[in-house]
Structure formats: structure tokens, C-alpha cells
């Protein structure tokens, strides 16, 4: 059960460690990106040099990018507009609905998509439920909102049980 819903296809320490060209060679061409603690620090409002570097590397590797965020405000869409990159706010992960909206927005098939995220119970579960490739990255920083910190010990148990 853990493998079906929570085990990512790949795991990397951070986004800058992901071999984007290798993923592109697998036929993946659409990068769906969680924002908080994946593409940038938790609850940021302005893109950083790191964020711009990751997006540039993805685009140079041939990916079309879209932020898929659970943020319940205009923060993620405002952030995305500054880069600029497409964005799905209120993604409702672990539901796959935000992923489906992103694929529709980008006119993409699920076989072309990869979701990058830092949370097993939201990002990876949503990707698995949508039937797309998933990459888990370790959280960008340890400082997180309390409700995410509460989930981290449970994630460690699932990661141990699913061997990743």
C-alpha cells in the first residue's frame, strides 16, 4: 500500500541535484513544481536566484514548467507571475485535481509529466493518484509551518516502511 500511494519514482536531496536532462530523455517534458520548500523556501513571496536557476535549467533541458501549489491565497500565482511561469493555486493535493488542471492548462498528457515536491502525503500522493512520474526532494529548509512539521515524523515512518 505504501508503495502505491507514497513511494516516489526518484528521491534527491534538492532540486539542484535532479538530473533534468536524464528525465527529459525518459520522455518527460512537463515539470509540475510544488512551491513551498521545493522550488523555494516555505511561504516566500519573491523568487530567489535559486528558483530562477532551477527554472532556467528545466527550460534548457526542454521542460515546460507549471507551479502546482496548495497555497490558499494569491501568493503562489503572484510569485509565478514574477518569473513568469504558469501556476495552479489551490491545487488541493493530495487530490489529483490540481495536477489535472495543470495538464489541461498546458495541453499535456500525464505520460509527459513529472511532479517535483517535498511532501510524501501531499505532493507524492497526488502524483501517484494522477498516474504521473514523481520526484521527492528533501525540504529546502527545516523551518516550516506547524501543520507540515506535524506530518514529518509520519513521513519518516512511511519512508522506512516503503524503503526510500
Image: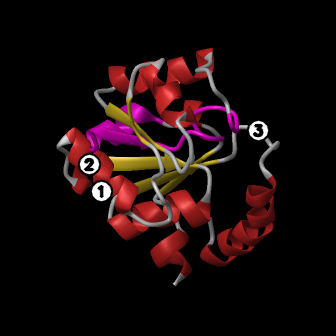
Which residue: 22% across, 48% down?
104
Q: CA distance from mark 1 to mark 3?
A: 28 Å
In the depicted view, which residue is nearer to us: 134 or 108?
108
Tag 2 and tag 1, C-beta contact below 8 Å: yes
Q: Which mark is residue 103?
A: 2
Q: Which mark is residue 141?
A: 3
Q: Which mark is residue 35?
A: none
In the depicted view, which residue is nearer to us: 104 or 112?
104
**What is the chief secondary structure element of the magenta stretch?**
loop
Q: Secondary structure at mark 3?
A: loop
In the depicted view, which residue is nearer to us: 135 or 39?
39
Q: Which residues are magenta?
A: 19-43
The mark total stands at 3
Disc 3 crowd, CA 10 A, few/some/many (<14, 14-19, 20+): few
Which residue: 44% across, 55% down?
134
Furthest-front residue in this view: 73
Which residue: 66% across, 69% down?
159
15 left or right of 152 in image: left
Magenta residue check for 35: yes
Q: Is residue 146 above or below residue 1?
A: above
Magenta residue check for 115: no
Which residue: 46% across, 77% down?
4
Furthest-bottom residue in this view: 1
Q: CA distance from mark 3 to mark 2?
A: 28 Å
Q: Which mark is residue 100?
A: 1
Tag 1 and tag 3, C-beta contact below 8 Å: no
Amino acid at each position: 500500500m505504501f508503495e502505491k500511494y507514497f513511494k516516489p519514482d526518484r528521491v534527491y536531496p534538492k532540486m539542484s541535484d535532479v538530473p533534468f536532462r536524464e528525465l527529459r530523455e525518459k520522455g518527460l517534458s512537463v515539470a509540475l513544481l510544488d512551491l513551498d520548500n521545493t522550488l523555494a523556501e516555505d511561504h516566500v513571496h519573491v523568487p530567489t536566484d535559486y528558483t530562477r536557476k532551477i527554472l532556467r535549467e528545466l527550460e534548457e533541458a526542454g521542460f515546460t514548467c507549471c507551479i502546482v501549489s496548495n497555497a490558499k491565497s494569491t501568493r503562489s500565482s503572484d510569485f509565478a507571475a514574477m518569473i513568469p511561469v504558469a501556476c495552479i493555486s489551490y491545487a488541493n493535493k493530495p487530490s489529483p485535481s490540481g495536477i489535472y488542471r495543470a495538464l489541461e492548462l498546458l495541453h499535456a498528457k500525464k505520460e509527459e509529466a513529472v511532479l517535483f515536491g517535498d511532501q510524501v502525503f501531499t505532493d507524492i500522493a497526488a502524483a501517484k493518484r494522477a498516474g504521473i512520474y514523481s520526484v521527492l526532494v528533501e525540504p529546502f529548509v527545516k523551518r516550516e509551518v506547524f501543520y507540515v512539521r506535524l506530518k514529518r515524523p509520519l513521513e519518516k515512518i512511511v519512508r522506512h516502511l516503503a524503503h526510500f
